[in-house]
Image (spheres, grey):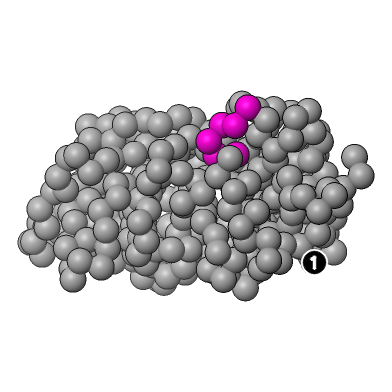
Amino acid sequence: MSGRVRLARLTDLAALGELSRLSQAEHVDARSLGLPVSGPRMGVFSLFRLPLGAFRPNDLLFVYEDERRISGLVRVERDASRDEWTIVELDAIGSGDSGDTRFRLVQHLLRDGAKRGAIRFHVACSDRQGNPELFMQAGFARYGQERLLFRGTDSSLPSAWTEEQTRAAGIRPCQSLDALPLARLYAAVTPQPVARLESYRLPDWERQGSSSRVPRSSLAPILRFAEMEAYVQVSTDDAAGDLLGLLQLGVAREEQPHYLKVLARPETDVVPLVSFGLALLAARIGKGGSCPNSGVLSPVRTYESPIDRRLEEAGFVILDTVTLFMKEAVVRVAEPALVPAVG
């Protein structure tokens, strides 16, 4: 292949929009991450849409150009606080060449990330269109799966909760002082190998309710367009002060789905958290009419069941399952520890 990878320019806008649209439409010669959010309102091109002016300063977009024709793009979201990069779109089109185009884009991204000090690279994708083979060939490791659930606009949202209902359920806004209990909640829910790979720190948990991406999900990039809120559920008779669950709510300001994420201990009934989140979303949508109701997306890790079943009971349907991949750009070393002295 004689093409080259370069940073995108504003003059590429029209070509990039068409390339993204064709890739998400399952064009016969196109390949993408294959996130199962299809349709005019929920398309990936709508969720992660251009123009480039809507990007954050930390976002990157590389294109593959061959004979003045753009045939591939890779779009990356950079988390400066954790030195992590997330691939949110990887598209290519071209008979017989789309696989090679995407591989060259990923390789260029990894080299560029190494120069800029990236510690980890993340991506979520379907198991179709050669995605697993591509990322494993590039050195990524598969470490989890998520079910993506969607609640459409056909069903009405619950009525707003009263303060008495909220207090009775033990739900309150998240605070920075909840960092340690949140870390304990995450450790109680998440398998140890996954927790080791994701490697969250207490400062990561302190940012809940602002622009936090912790715990991360395959739909985290949608939060760039959302106002984030976080709530915790506490037990009224637990002297240890442990949290029962965490609710993250992303309220979209564009014509795209809203976001609801629940993290809870296996023995916790998450129905109050889900109902409270949907009712709060209804209040946000009705407030001044500035938030369109385009449905709600919710990601659930496969090991977080039965949260997915509780969401289905609340009107959500499973769209598909996506695989989570990660590549570490640094070598882990054993942490120093005290050992008994031998006399």
User: Which corner quadrant of the image does residue 143 belong to?
Assistant: top right
Q: Position of residue 149 (x, y in %)?
A: 37, 37
Q: Position of residue 44 (x, y in %)?
A: 50, 46
Magenta stretch contains residue 260: no
Q: Main secondary structure of the magenta part?
A: loop
Q: Is residue 83 above or below residue 65?
A: below
Q: Would residue 12 appear left or right of 291 to someone viewing this image?
A: right
Q: Position of residue 254 (x, y in %)?
A: 37, 61
The residue nearer to you, when weighing 205 against 325, is: 325
Q: Residue at x 73, y 45 (%)?
A: 71
Q: Residue furthest right?
A: 2
Q: Residue at x 30, y 50 (%)?
A: 294
Q: Which residue is mark 1?
A: 116
Magenta stretch contains residue 25: yes
Q: Residue at x 27, y 58 (%)?
A: 292
Asked whether the viewer can see residue 303, the reply is no
Instruction: Kindly identify the amino acid type of the residue bearing the numbered disc 1.
Output: Arg
The residue nearer to you, when weighing 229 against 163, is: 229
Asked whether the viewer can see residue 46, the reply is yes
User: Which corner quadrant of the image does residue 236 belong to?
Assistant: bottom left
Q: Would residue 45 appear left or right of 333 to someone viewing this image?
A: left
Q: Would residue 107 appear left or right of 185 to someone viewing this image?
A: right
Q: Is residue 89 above or below residue 229?
A: above
Q: Quadrant of the N terminus?
A: top right
The residue nearer to you, when weighing 333 against 26, is: 26
Q: Residue at x 35, y 33 (%)?
A: 308
Neighbour tally class for label 1: few under 14, some 14-19, many 20 plus, Cα within 10 Å:
few
Q: What residue span does the magenta drawing correspond to?
A: 23-28
Q: Secondary structure at mark 1?
A: loop
Q: Position of residue 274 (x, y in %)?
A: 25, 46
